[in-house]
Image (cartoon, rainbow, N blue to C red):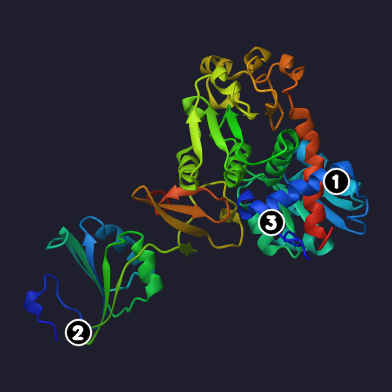
């Protein structure tokens, strides 16, 4: 039977059903234990990064190579016909897709991946479009949650830091809504979860609450999802005052459940202190590694009718 | 034939009458109508007495018969209004305005970093009534805006 993701564009996490998310997670798990260097043999994947990226680009390119495929592309849009000659993204995508079997793309403008999917003749995988979506980050987050908890259902997940602008937070929360999660939010007023997201949670019947500090969060969460409070959003004094309340230390974790794991999309600056790295709760580096397996799973499913 | 003496705004032979517009919304609809064509002959009545609404606005457009799609675009401004299509002084069609599910190519996305601003595609919004507002979500950048922000009111 053809897998439901075969030849499908992966633009937004909201396009994926619960079953499709579970399929990606289980495929990532199996590729992590049993490498399959045959799955992309003879396939060429375009890696078009119109905006700089470290983890996403390198893990996509690693994933292609580990599956036996090859990639072409660029790591910076500055030298492309778009930047140099004023070509539209629509035209660039039509040309690039005619060379390759799939197109992985990051672009600084929101909506770029959706637009690309309308002009491409091959599947488009969104590697981040401006502040909008970053579905493969969510897939690796889900895989890391599944790997560390043994399930995706009914988990207590705390989101901390910048919940307003953080696209990874929004996408992961949207995905977890399909698995009946319970949310706790810890964020300054200025960076609290936006109303349109809270309305979505209410409509889906998801319960959520707001916490004031890490002590309220740590003792009953299964997952703490940390993000960075960005300096540039505040003046310096205000930032120092606010940021200091959103720094997670090993001290906060004394009453944490044994199964609790801390995730972070990285890069971190100082919002998780180094002493947390040495606790059994730290999982962000395994999470980053899982980026390769989650992306392998996605590429394998999109480019193979059956696995 | 409709008796003219009963009407607060003169009857038209052929055209479209947008009635039961909540008072104050008529101006917004009018500005959208003018986008359809500057030569449209339009008669307006503002703050007319209405049994249902207390006060209402009414707009009559001569020699232009609106279809349901055009009506639904205007429905964004006054979902409660009714549209009467008139031919030979007689109502030939009557429909309620409603909030359309989707609007394409009419309004620009308010997000200045949305890809639609410099690519060869039409804007596209899905609409949803929420908390007594109409939310418009851009198909491309996936951002949701209050209707008033999108239509620039």
Instruction: Specify the quadrant that holds the N terminus of chain A.
Output: bottom right
Q: Which residue is drawn at the image coordinates 50% and 24% (left, top)?
A: A211
Q: Is residue A24 shown left or right of residue B146? A: right
Q: Are the residues flagged by discs 1 and 3 from a single subunit?
A: yes
Which chain is home to disc 1? Answer: A
Q: Is residue B65 shown left or right of residue A238? A: left
Q: Which mark is residue B89?
A: 2
Per the image, label 3 sits on a secondary structure element best described as helix
Q: Around disc 2, counting alpha carbons within 10 Å, would you say few (fewer than 14), some (14 to 19), or many (20 or more)? A: some
Q: What residue is pinned by disc 3?
A: A89
Per the image, label 1 sits on a secondary structure element best described as helix
Task: Choose mark 1 or mark 2, whichever is in front.
Answer: 1
Q: Which residue is drawn at the image coordinates 75% and 65% (left, top)?
A: A121
Which chain is home to disc 3? Answer: A
Q: What residue is pinned by disc 1?
A: A31
Picture coordinates of residue B105 (x, y %)?
49, 64
Picture coordinates of residue A44 (x, y %)?
87, 57
């Amino acid at each position: 039977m053809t897998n439901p993701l075969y030849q499908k564009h992966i633009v937004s996490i909201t396009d994926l059903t619960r079953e499709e998310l579970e399929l990606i997670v289980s495929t990532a798990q199996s590729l992590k234990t049993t490498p399959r260097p045959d799955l992309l043999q003879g396939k060429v994947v375009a890696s078009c990064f119109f905006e700089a990226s470290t983890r996403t680009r390198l893990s996509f390119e690693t994933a292609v190579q580990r599956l036996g495929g090859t990639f072409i592309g660029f790591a910076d849009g500055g030298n492309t016909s778009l930047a140099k000659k004023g070509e539209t993204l629509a035209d660039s995508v039509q040309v690039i897709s005619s060379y390759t079997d799939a197109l992985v793309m990051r672009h600084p403008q929101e909506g770029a991946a959706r637009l690309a999917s309308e002009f491409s003749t091959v599947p488009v995988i969104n590697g981040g479009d401006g502040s909008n979506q970053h579905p493969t980050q969510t897939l690796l987050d889900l895989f890391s949650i599944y790997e560390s908890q043994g399930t995706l259902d009914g988990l207590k997940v705390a989101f901390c830091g910048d919940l307003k602008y953080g696209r990874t937070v929004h996408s992961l929360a949207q995905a977890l809504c399909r698995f009946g999660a319970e949310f706790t939010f810890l964020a300054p007023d200025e960076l609290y979860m936006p109303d349109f997201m809270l309305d979505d949670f209410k409509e889906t019947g998801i319960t959520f609450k707001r916490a004031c500090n890490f002590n309220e969060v740590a003792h009953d969460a299964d997952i703490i999802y940390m993000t960075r409070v960005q300096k540039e959003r505040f003046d310096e004094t205000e930032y120092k005052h606010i940021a200091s309340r959103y720094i997670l230390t090993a001290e906060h974790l004394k009453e944490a459940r044994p199964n609790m794991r801390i995730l972070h999309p990285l890069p971190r600056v100082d919002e998780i202190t180094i002493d947390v790295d040495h606790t059994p709760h730290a999982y962000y580096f395994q999470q980053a590694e899982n980026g390769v397996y989650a992306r392998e799973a996605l590429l394998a499913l999109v480019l193979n009718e059956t696995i | 034939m409709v008796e003219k003496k009963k009407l607060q705004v003169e009857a038209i032979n052929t055209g479209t009458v947008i009635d039961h517009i909540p008072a104050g919304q008529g101006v917004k609809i009018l500005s959208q109508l003018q986008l359809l064509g500057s030569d449209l002959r339009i008669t307006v009545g503002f703050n007319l007495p209405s049994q249902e609404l207390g006060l209402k606005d009414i707009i009559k457009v001569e020699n232009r018969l609106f279809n349901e799609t055009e009506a639904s675009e205007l429905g964004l401004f006054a979902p409660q209004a009714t549209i009467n299509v008139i031919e030979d002084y007689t109502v030939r069609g009557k429909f309620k305005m409603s909030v359309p599910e989707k609007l394409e190519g009419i309004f620009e996305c308010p997000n200045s970093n949305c890809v639609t601003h410099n690519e060869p595609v039409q804007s596209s919004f899905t609409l949803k009534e929420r908390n007594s507002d109409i939310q418009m979500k851009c198909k491309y950048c996936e951002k949701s805006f209050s209707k008033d922000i999108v239509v620039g009111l």
